[in-house]
Image: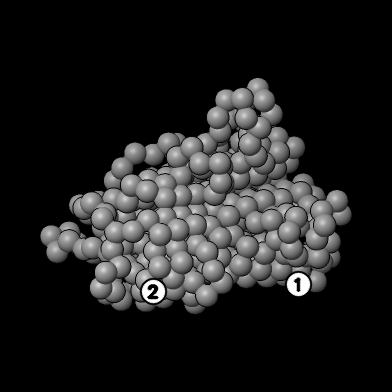
Amino acid sequence: MALGAALALLAAVAAAGTVAAVADRDTDRVATTGGDPGAPAANGSGAATSSAAPRASERLGARPTGPSTATPSAAARATGFPGAGNTGVPDGVRLGGYSGPCTITRANTVIDRRHVRCSLVVKAANVVIRSSRVDGTIRLEGESHSLRVEDSEVDGGQAYEHTVGFENLTVLRSEIRGGQTSVNCYRNCLVQDSWLHGQYLPDGEDWHLNAFLSNGGSDIRLVHNTLACDRRGNASGGGCTADVSIFGDFGPNTNYTIRDNLFVASDQMSYCLYGGFDEKKQYGTQVSGIVVTGNVFERGGNGRCGSYGPVTSYARSAPGNEWRDNVWSDGKPLAPSS
């Protein structure tokens, strides 16, 4: 869709109290390291299936089951951005119990249509979690290992850490909630068609929350998600930093694609997007290839998306950086300095 036509459409729909998406849906649903989601579970892997339950839908639009800690924004409900109606376990899928290990060490393990009631540590390649609910966090360990989460719900509860992370990770059409940060990645991650929201903040703690966080990373793609850091702050200084935070704390940041997402507004967080450049960070000037295109930023009650503005720390002049076709929810163009 041409930018002029997209802006006209957004403005027209916004006038009626809704928001329109400005870019076509990305059709790539497979990450290079996610493994074969149709592969059978290895013997003894702890994976289980139920012949009475249907396979998870491969299309966006199936309605999930299970509770949610927050409701999607008006923009998500109005436009088909990911939310309660099109992420998570699809309608009609009956979840069985999970009796497998909480530390997965067997390659090609598939957990299909299960309710997992523990945090998972993945130490194997080509692990798939499909049409399932996980009450706990998921942590992948080891650069040769990989994980794919699709059509699932992961609830990190009260964990003082990410709900899903850290590398060689694919998340598709899933609802990720709870925990301090919804998804934390530092290398080779795709999050697509998913809803990140509902982080946890205890009273009396100064936790810093994010929907997506990288403290130094590469080869990261965020495509057509609803990104919301929507927990209210507390009296101890804890609260949301941003919907998406890219910081140069532990390494350089390079080769990011942030495309066609909805950034949900909140005056409880500083900005909606931290773009990676910060001279006060150890690697804060080593930024390149951060491409931000076709995203919609809600204005929110204060008109700025975040408390101070929509975006900060984005260096347009850095090698390979690109900022294009990003708009406010009323259709007006958005520049990084806005």
Q: How is the image coloured?
A: one colour
Describe the element under mark 2 as helix, strand or loop: loop
* Quarter of image, res 60: bottom left
Label 1 crowding class (10 Å Cα cut-off): few <14, some 14-19, many 20+? some
Label 2 crowding class (10 Å Cα cut-off): few <14, some 14-19, many 20+? some
In the foreground, 233 or 292: 233
How many discs appear? 2
Give the residue pinned by disc 2.
107
At horizontal 49% and vertical 57% (from top left) the residue drawn is 139
Q: Is residue 305 left or right of residue 84?
A: right
Describe the element under mark 1 as helix, strand or loop: loop
Q: Is residue 5 visible?
A: no
The amino acid on which the numbered mark 2 sits, given as a three-letter code, is: Ala
Q: Position of residue 100 (x, y in %)?
A: 29, 59
At horizontal 46% and vertical 50% (from top left) the residue drawn is 137
Q: Position of residue 5 (x, y in %)?
A: 58, 60
Q: Are marks 2 and 1 in contact (CB under 8 Å)?
A: no
The amino acid on which the numbered mark 1 sits, given as a three-letter code, is: Gly
Give the alpha-carbon distance from disc 2 to disc 1, as whole Å. 36 Å
In the foreground, 3 or 275: 275
Give the residue furthest to the right. Answer: 279
Quadrant that contains the N terminus: bottom right
Give the residue furthest to the left. Answer: 52
Of labels 2 and 1, the one closer to you: 2
Say which mark, if any, is on residue 320.
1
Q: Position of residue 280 (x, y in %)?
A: 85, 51
At horizontal 29% and vertical 46% (from top left) the residue drawn is 65
Task: Tell which circle, 2 or 1, labels the residue nearer the N-terminal end.
Answer: 2
Q: Position of residue 259 (x, y in %)?
A: 59, 62
